[in-house]
Image (cartoon, helix red, strand yellow):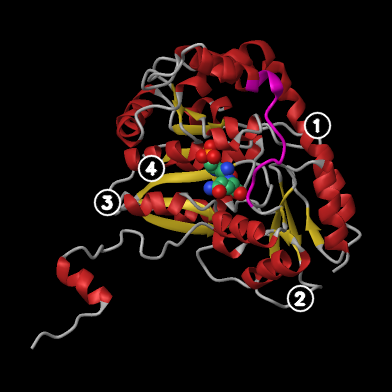
Amino acid sequence: MWLKLSAPEKREASGLEIDSKLPNTGTTIFTVMSALANKHGAINLSQGFPDYNPPSELLEAACSALSEGHNQYAPMAGLIDLRLQVGALTKLRHHYDADPETEITIVPGATEAIFCAIQACVNHGEEVIVFDPAYDCYEPSVTLAGGKTIHLPLQLPNFHIDWQQLADSITPATRMIIINSPHNPTGSVLNQQDLERLADIVRDTRIIILSDEVYEYLVYDGQVHHSVLSHAELRERSYAIFSFGKTLHATGWKTGYCIAPPALSRELRKIHQYVCFVAVTPIQRGLADYLAHHWGQLNLLSGFYQQKRDLFCQGLNQSRFKLIPSAGTYFQLADYGEISDMGDLKFSRWLTTEVGVAAIPLSPFYAEKNNNTLVRFCFAKQDATLQEALIKLCQI
Ligand code: PMP
Ligand code: GLN
């Protein structure tokens, strides 16, 4: 007599059962919270994306690129015209003349470049240091490369790096340090002194820096962004990664770039060419044409977003939330400790379903369980959207 197998047993018996390479990874919190916001018709201040369009000149440039026939594969490293524009911008902003042929790679989103850079450098058993709360895509990429992620906590009250703790955490197995400034989710930024400390720590080691600078234009209160590219020593060992999604209100275009020395870029491209081969051609063409004429517009971003941050913070100051100052990005942390003793996942769900405003809980950004009562709001929204959300948040 045949014994009936359960569905999981059948899969196992058939040999189709997958031994997951990411057993502890679920669906990203951004996907989960946006879906919840949509389901309940909540104002979505969770996942980071604007509720307004890219500049009209950029939309026109991309439409022209489509209709004028820029619809076939671009060169693997990206359209040369876009790489030239990126090179010119980099020289202007970071005083570094990156070679478009060997150092600049156009990628289908910063996420892909982060993945490729990690796969290129990290070997089995090597360590990668990240700072918690950390953006979600770093650790899975390290795990897939066979590496080990070492989590160091950013220090309260302003989420800065404890450089001594970093120095003490370096081992012979340390292969990479990932920094992210301006920082998602806390809004903290690194200054020149921070870069000097980092350079001191990695000097005479084989450590590579992955510098996630996707929010480079979004720094406030008269500060400037300090890129690893502006530091002669650090840039020799760094992948600096950027995203047009943030700078041009076009997160759905998934286009960015990576700047790294030739030897590092060569290895990144070996992976990039087999993950996706190239970024999307008409989008690259549109970006190149837009930047050629309108690159100056990027300098307005900081003022544009500072006004939104201030509007949101002034409103939220009338609520029972306590604000953690945000020096950069389009995110604002808020402490709900005086409102509720729920855990942050539960509180964020409640806020979405009962109050009608979606936010991102902070615990998914931490490896260790912690009891903070913080949520992240995205203020890259029309003023009217922010005002509508503030009315709801102030009623709690
Ligand atoms: N790094 C950080 C810190 C981010 O917040 C994001 C997300 N938007 C990315 C990387 C990924 O950017 P992209 O959408 O260009 O892949
Ligand atoms: N970076 C965006 C955020 O932090 C989300 C991007 C994504 O959903 N993967 O909200």
Q: CA distance from mark 2 to mark 3?
A: 44 Å
The Cα–Cα distance between marks 4 and 1, rounded to whole angstroms, is: 34 Å
Q: Are the residues tagged 2 and 4 within 8 Å (C-beta)?
A: no
* Res. 103 in view: yes
Point out the tag, 2 or 3, that comes first from the N-terminus. Answer: 3
Ligand 1 positioned in quadrant: top right
The tag on residue 340 is 2
Q: Amino acid at mark 3?
A: His
CA separation in Å, label 2 and label 1: 34 Å
Residue 249: x and y, percent?
A: 66, 33
Crowdedness of circle 1 by 10 Å Cα count: few (<14), some, many (20+)? Answer: some
Say whether marks 4 and 3 touch (CB < 8 Å). Answer: no
Q: Verify CB contact (< 8 Å) between mark 4 and mark 1.
A: no
**Quick one: 370 or 253, which is closer to the camera?**
253
N-term mark: 2 or 4: 4
SS label for mark 1: helix
Q: Which residue is mark 4?
A: 118
